Image: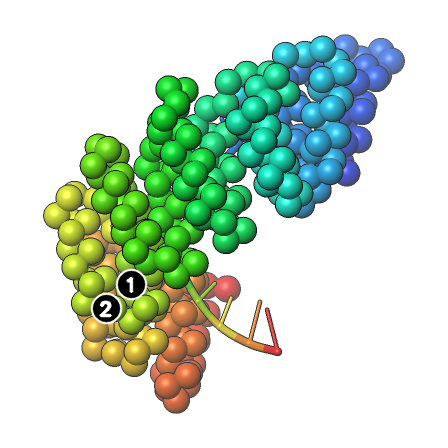
DNA sequence: CTAGGGTTAG
Protein backbone atom coordinates (compact mmCIF):
# COMPACT_ATOMS: atom_id res chain seq x y z
CA UNK A 1 0.00 0.00 0.00
CA UNK A 2 2.83 2.39 0.78
CA UNK A 3 4.15 1.81 -2.74
CA UNK A 4 1.17 3.66 -4.12
CA UNK A 5 2.60 6.92 -2.74
CA UNK A 6 6.07 6.30 -4.09
CA UNK A 7 9.09 4.47 -2.81
CA UNK A 8 10.06 6.59 0.21
CA UNK A 9 7.46 5.36 2.65
CA UNK A 10 7.84 1.82 1.37
CA UNK A 11 11.58 2.09 1.88
CA UNK A 12 11.14 3.32 5.45
CA UNK A 13 8.81 0.45 6.26
CA UNK A 14 11.14 -2.00 4.60
CA UNK A 15 14.12 -0.86 6.65
CA UNK A 16 12.07 -1.04 9.80
CA UNK A 17 11.08 -4.61 9.00
CA UNK A 18 14.71 -5.51 8.40
CA UNK A 19 15.77 -4.03 11.73
CA UNK A 20 13.05 -5.89 13.63
CA UNK A 21 12.16 -3.07 15.93
CA UNK A 22 12.74 -3.63 19.62
CA UNK A 23 9.84 -5.18 21.42
CA UNK A 24 7.96 -6.00 18.25
CA UNK A 25 7.88 -9.30 16.55
CA UNK A 26 8.15 -8.48 12.87
CA UNK A 27 8.20 -10.95 10.04
CA UNK A 28 11.39 -10.69 8.00
CA UNK A 29 11.09 -9.68 4.35
CA UNK A 30 10.39 -12.52 1.99
CA UNK A 31 10.77 -12.95 -1.73
CA UNK A 32 7.29 -11.40 -2.05
CA UNK A 33 8.42 -8.26 -0.25
CA UNK A 34 11.21 -7.77 -2.73
CA UNK A 35 8.95 -8.44 -5.70
CA UNK A 36 6.44 -5.84 -4.58
CA UNK A 37 9.14 -3.26 -3.90
CA UNK A 38 10.89 -3.80 -7.21
CA UNK A 39 7.63 -3.44 -9.06
CA UNK A 40 6.82 -0.31 -7.11
CA UNK A 41 10.15 1.22 -8.13
CA UNK A 42 9.30 0.68 -11.80
CA UNK A 43 5.95 2.37 -11.33
CA UNK A 44 7.53 5.49 -9.91
CA UNK A 45 10.20 5.40 -12.62
CA UNK A 46 13.04 4.57 -10.25
CA UNK A 47 14.44 1.39 -11.81
CA UNK A 48 17.79 2.10 -10.17
CA UNK A 49 16.19 1.54 -6.78
CA UNK A 50 14.51 -1.61 -8.03
CA UNK A 51 17.84 -2.99 -9.19
CA UNK A 52 19.35 -2.13 -5.83
CA UNK A 53 16.63 -4.15 -4.13
CA UNK A 54 17.43 -7.05 -6.39
CA UNK A 55 21.08 -6.85 -5.38
CA UNK A 56 20.04 -6.80 -1.77
CA UNK A 57 17.83 -9.82 -2.32
CA UNK A 58 20.78 -11.75 -3.73
CA UNK A 59 22.89 -10.85 -0.70
CA UNK A 60 20.25 -12.20 1.70
CA UNK A 61 20.62 -15.60 0.08
CA UNK A 62 16.91 -15.89 -0.61
CA UNK A 63 16.06 -17.77 -3.78
CA UNK A 64 14.54 -15.75 -6.57
CA UNK A 65 11.43 -16.89 -8.36
CA UNK A 66 9.76 -16.30 -11.74
CA UNK A 67 8.00 -13.16 -10.61
CA UNK A 68 11.12 -11.49 -9.29
CA UNK A 69 13.03 -12.55 -12.40
CA UNK A 70 10.42 -10.89 -14.61
CA UNK A 71 10.38 -7.81 -12.44
CA UNK A 72 14.17 -7.59 -12.70
CA UNK A 73 13.81 -7.55 -16.49
CA UNK A 74 11.15 -4.88 -16.13
CA UNK A 75 13.57 -2.76 -14.10
CA UNK A 76 16.27 -3.11 -16.77
CA UNK A 77 13.81 -2.19 -19.52
CA UNK A 78 12.50 0.74 -17.50
CA UNK A 79 16.11 1.92 -17.13
CA UNK A 80 16.41 1.94 -20.94
CA UNK A 81 18.72 -1.06 -20.76
CA UNK A 82 16.72 -3.33 -23.06
CA UNK A 83 19.86 -4.84 -24.57
CA UNK A 84 20.99 -6.03 -21.16
CA UNK A 85 17.51 -7.36 -20.52
CA UNK A 86 17.68 -9.39 -23.74
CA UNK A 87 21.10 -10.69 -22.77
CA UNK A 88 19.99 -11.69 -19.28
CA UNK A 89 16.84 -13.27 -20.65
CA UNK A 90 18.63 -15.38 -23.24
CA UNK A 91 21.99 -16.18 -21.74
CA UNK A 92 21.99 -15.49 -18.03
CA UNK A 93 19.57 -17.88 -16.42
CA UNK A 94 22.02 -17.92 -13.52
CA UNK A 95 21.33 -14.23 -12.84
CA UNK A 96 17.57 -14.74 -13.03
CA UNK A 97 17.76 -17.76 -10.76
CA UNK A 98 15.12 -19.57 -12.78
CA UNK A 99 13.95 -20.34 -16.28
CA UNK A 100 12.25 -17.30 -17.81
CA UNK A 101 8.52 -17.67 -18.39
CA UNK A 102 6.11 -15.95 -20.76
CA UNK A 103 5.92 -12.87 -18.51
CA UNK A 104 9.68 -12.46 -18.83
CA UNK A 105 9.61 -12.64 -22.61
CA UNK A 106 6.57 -10.42 -23.01
CA UNK A 107 8.06 -7.70 -20.84
CA UNK A 108 11.17 -7.56 -23.01
CA UNK A 109 9.17 -7.83 -26.24
CA UNK A 110 7.12 -4.81 -25.24
CA UNK A 111 10.18 -2.82 -24.33
CA UNK A 112 11.79 -3.45 -27.72
CA UNK A 113 8.58 -2.53 -29.54
CA UNK A 114 8.21 0.68 -27.53
CA UNK A 115 11.75 1.46 -28.58
CA UNK A 116 10.76 1.05 -32.26
CA UNK A 117 12.77 -2.15 -32.44
CA UNK A 118 9.92 -4.47 -33.38
CA UNK A 119 12.13 -6.31 -35.86
CA UNK A 120 14.44 -7.30 -33.00
CA UNK A 121 11.39 -8.24 -30.97
CA UNK A 122 10.40 -10.53 -33.81
CA UNK A 123 13.75 -12.27 -33.49
CA UNK A 124 13.07 -12.80 -29.80
CA UNK A 125 9.61 -14.14 -30.57
CA UNK A 126 11.19 -16.66 -32.93
CA UNK A 127 13.51 -17.74 -30.14
CA UNK A 128 10.43 -18.39 -28.00
CA UNK A 129 8.83 -20.37 -30.79
CA UNK A 130 11.91 -22.56 -31.27
CA UNK A 131 12.55 -23.25 -27.60
CA UNK A 132 10.31 -25.36 -25.44
CA UNK A 133 10.17 -23.20 -22.31
CA UNK A 134 7.23 -21.10 -23.37
CA UNK A 135 5.86 -20.57 -26.84
CA UNK A 136 4.55 -17.15 -27.87
CA UNK A 137 0.94 -16.58 -26.87
CA UNK A 138 -1.71 -14.05 -27.70
CA UNK A 139 -0.01 -11.35 -25.61
CA UNK A 140 3.33 -11.84 -27.39
CA UNK A 141 1.77 -11.65 -30.84
CA UNK A 142 -0.45 -8.71 -29.96
CA UNK A 143 2.54 -6.79 -28.64
CA UNK A 144 4.44 -7.26 -31.88
CA UNK A 145 1.48 -6.58 -34.15
CA UNK A 146 0.96 -3.29 -32.35
CA UNK A 147 4.68 -2.54 -32.55
CA UNK A 148 4.87 -3.10 -36.30
CA UNK A 149 1.78 -0.98 -36.95
CA UNK A 150 3.24 1.80 -34.85
CA UNK A 151 6.39 1.70 -36.99
CA UNK A 152 4.32 1.78 -40.17
CA UNK A 153 5.26 -1.79 -41.04
CA UNK A 154 1.74 -2.75 -42.06
CA UNK A 155 2.81 -5.79 -44.07
CA UNK A 156 4.82 -7.26 -41.22
CA UNK A 157 1.96 -6.69 -38.81
CA UNK A 158 -0.46 -8.50 -41.10
CA UNK A 159 1.96 -11.37 -41.68
CA UNK A 160 2.27 -11.83 -37.96
CA UNK A 161 -1.49 -11.83 -37.52
CA UNK A 162 -1.78 -14.65 -40.03
CA UNK A 163 1.18 -16.46 -38.50
CA UNK A 164 -0.42 -16.45 -35.06
CA UNK A 165 -3.61 -17.95 -36.47
CA UNK A 166 -1.61 -20.61 -38.30
CA UNK A 167 0.00 -21.46 -34.97
CA UNK A 168 -3.44 -21.89 -33.44
CA UNK A 169 -3.09 -18.81 -31.21
CA UNK A 170 -6.53 -17.22 -31.01
CA UNK A 171 -6.70 -13.42 -31.38
CA UNK A 172 -8.58 -11.67 -28.59
CA UNK A 173 -10.11 -8.24 -28.03
CA UNK A 174 -6.71 -6.57 -27.71
CA UNK A 175 -5.35 -8.10 -30.91
CA UNK A 176 -8.39 -7.01 -32.89
CA UNK A 177 -8.50 -3.58 -31.29
CA UNK A 178 -4.87 -2.92 -32.22
CA UNK A 179 -5.56 -3.81 -35.83
CA UNK A 180 -8.75 -1.78 -35.92
CA UNK A 181 -7.00 1.21 -34.38
CA UNK A 182 -4.21 1.07 -36.96
CA UNK A 183 -6.74 0.88 -39.80
CA UNK A 184 -8.71 3.80 -38.35
CA UNK A 185 -5.59 5.91 -38.05
CA UNK A 186 -4.83 5.13 -41.70
CA UNK A 187 -8.34 6.29 -42.61
CA UNK A 188 -9.22 2.79 -43.86
CA UNK A 189 -12.62 2.75 -42.18
CA UNK A 190 -14.08 0.11 -44.49
CA UNK A 191 -11.37 -2.33 -43.50
CA UNK A 192 -11.79 -1.39 -39.85
CA UNK A 193 -15.50 -2.21 -40.16
CA UNK A 194 -14.62 -5.57 -41.68
CA UNK A 195 -12.38 -6.46 -38.74
CA UNK A 196 -15.02 -5.28 -36.29
CA UNK A 197 -17.53 -7.66 -37.91
CA UNK A 198 -14.92 -10.41 -38.09
CA UNK A 199 -14.19 -10.22 -34.37
CA UNK A 200 -17.88 -10.34 -33.52
CA UNK A 201 -18.29 -13.34 -35.85
CA UNK A 202 -15.47 -15.04 -33.97
CA UNK A 203 -17.32 -14.30 -30.73
CA UNK A 204 -14.73 -11.84 -29.47
CA UNK A 205 -16.68 -8.98 -27.88
CA UNK A 206 -15.53 -5.47 -28.81
CA UNK A 207 -15.09 -3.24 -25.77
CA UNK A 208 -14.92 0.48 -25.04
CA UNK A 209 -11.38 0.72 -26.39
CA UNK A 210 -12.41 -0.87 -29.69
CA UNK A 211 -15.29 1.56 -30.14
CA UNK A 212 -13.20 4.53 -29.08
CA UNK A 213 -10.85 3.75 -31.98
CA UNK A 214 -13.74 3.47 -34.42
CA UNK A 215 -15.33 6.70 -33.23
CA UNK A 216 -11.97 8.43 -33.36
CA UNK A 217 -11.46 7.24 -36.92
CA UNK A 218 -14.85 8.42 -38.17
CA UNK A 219 -14.86 11.73 -36.35
CA UNK A 220 -11.33 12.59 -37.54
CA UNK A 221 -12.71 12.28 -41.07
CA UNK A 222 -15.74 14.35 -40.16
CA UNK A 223 -18.03 11.39 -40.77
CA UNK A 224 -20.44 12.26 -37.96
CA UNK A 225 -23.25 9.97 -39.10
CA UNK A 226 -21.06 6.90 -38.86
CA UNK A 227 -19.51 8.06 -35.61
CA UNK A 228 -22.97 8.44 -34.11
CA UNK A 229 -23.85 4.97 -35.34
CA UNK A 230 -20.81 3.62 -33.46
CA UNK A 231 -21.90 5.41 -30.27
CA UNK A 232 -25.31 3.77 -30.63
CA UNK A 233 -23.82 0.37 -31.31
CA UNK A 234 -21.53 0.50 -28.29
CA UNK A 235 -24.22 1.62 -25.86
CA UNK A 236 -26.61 -1.01 -27.19
CA UNK A 237 -23.94 -3.51 -26.16
CA UNK A 238 -23.98 -2.06 -22.67
CA UNK A 239 -20.67 -0.25 -23.12
CA UNK A 240 -20.32 3.28 -21.78
CA UNK A 241 -18.13 5.91 -23.47
CA UNK A 242 -15.47 7.06 -21.05
CA UNK A 243 -13.25 10.12 -20.70
CA UNK A 244 -10.98 9.00 -23.55
CA UNK A 245 -13.89 8.47 -25.92
CA UNK A 246 -15.33 11.90 -25.15
CA UNK A 247 -12.02 13.76 -25.24
CA UNK A 248 -11.23 12.35 -28.64
CA UNK A 249 -14.70 13.09 -29.96
CA UNK A 250 -14.74 16.68 -28.65
CA UNK A 251 -11.32 17.32 -30.19
CA UNK A 252 -12.58 16.25 -33.60
CA UNK A 253 -15.66 18.41 -33.29
CA UNK A 254 -13.49 21.42 -32.44
CA UNK A 255 -11.11 20.78 -35.33
CA UNK A 256 -14.08 20.70 -37.70
CA UNK A 257 -15.44 24.00 -36.40
CA UNK A 258 -18.14 22.41 -34.28
CA UNK A 259 -17.06 23.78 -30.94
CA UNK A 260 -20.66 24.46 -30.00
CA UNK A 261 -21.45 20.75 -30.17
CA UNK A 262 -18.24 19.99 -28.29
CA UNK A 263 -19.20 22.43 -25.54
CA UNK A 264 -22.58 20.72 -25.19
CA UNK A 265 -20.85 17.41 -24.62
CA UNK A 266 -18.42 19.02 -22.23
CA UNK A 267 -21.19 20.41 -20.04
CA UNK A 268 -23.30 17.29 -20.20
CA UNK A 269 -20.27 15.32 -19.03
CA UNK A 270 -19.90 17.61 -16.05
CA UNK A 271 -23.60 17.24 -15.35
CA UNK A 272 -23.17 13.48 -15.31
CA UNK A 273 -20.36 13.75 -12.79
CA UNK A 274 -17.48 13.16 -15.19
CA UNK A 275 -14.39 15.11 -14.27
C1' DC B 1 4.24 -9.53 -6.41
C1' DT B 2 5.25 -9.93 -12.95
C1' DA B 3 3.05 -9.34 -19.52
C1' DG B 4 -0.58 -6.68 -24.67
C1' DG B 5 -4.85 -2.17 -27.15
C1' DG B 6 -7.92 3.75 -27.29
C1' DT B 7 -7.62 10.72 -26.61
C1' DT B 8 -6.44 15.78 -26.04
C1' DA B 9 -2.16 20.08 -25.47
C1' DG B 10 2.74 22.32 -25.94
Chain ID at mark 1: A
Question: Label 2, label 1: how many angstroms apart (C-alpha)?
Answer: 7 Å
Give A221 or A260, whichever is nearer the viewer: A221
Q: Position of residue A177 (x, y in %)?
A: 31, 53
- Both labels 2 and 1 in a single chain: yes
- State the scheme by which the image is colored: rainbow
Residue A152 sits in which quadrant?
A: bottom left
Q: Position of residue A109 (x, y in %)?
A: 47, 40
Residue A209 sits in which quadrant?
A: bottom left
Question: Which residue is painted at 19% across and 49% down in the image?
Answer: A199
| Label disc, if present, on residue A189 of the rendered structure | 2
Give A164 or A155, whichever is nearer the viewer: A155
**Above or below: residue B2 compared with residue A180:** above
Question: Is A64 placed left or right of B5 in the picture?
Answer: right
**Quadrant into which the N terminus of chain A falls:** top right
Q: Position of residue A53 (x, y in %)?
A: 72, 27
Task: Looking at this view, name the residue that lies furthest to the right.
Answer: A22
Give A132 or A96, whichever is nearer the viewer: A132
Question: Which residue is painted at 45% across and 42% down in the image?
Answer: A121
Q: Are marks 2 and 1 in contact (CB under 8 Å)?
A: yes
Question: Which residue is painted at 42% across and 51% down in the image?
Answer: A147
Label 2 element class = helix
Q: Which residue is mark 1?
A: A183
Is residue A92 at all visible to an observer of this figure? Answer: yes
Label 1 element class = helix
Question: Which residue is painted at 53% across and 21% down in the image?
Answer: A66
Question: Is A58 placed left or right of A264 in the picture?
Answer: right
**Above or below: residue A124 compared with residue A66:** below
Amino acid sequence: DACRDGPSLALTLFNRVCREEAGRRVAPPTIYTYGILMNCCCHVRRPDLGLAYFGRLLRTGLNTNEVVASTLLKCLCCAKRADEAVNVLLHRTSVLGCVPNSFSYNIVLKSLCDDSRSQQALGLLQVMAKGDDCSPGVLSYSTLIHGFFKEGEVGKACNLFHEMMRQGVVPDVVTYSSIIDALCKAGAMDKAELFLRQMVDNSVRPDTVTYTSMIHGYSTLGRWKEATKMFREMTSRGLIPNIVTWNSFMASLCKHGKSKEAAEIFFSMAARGHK
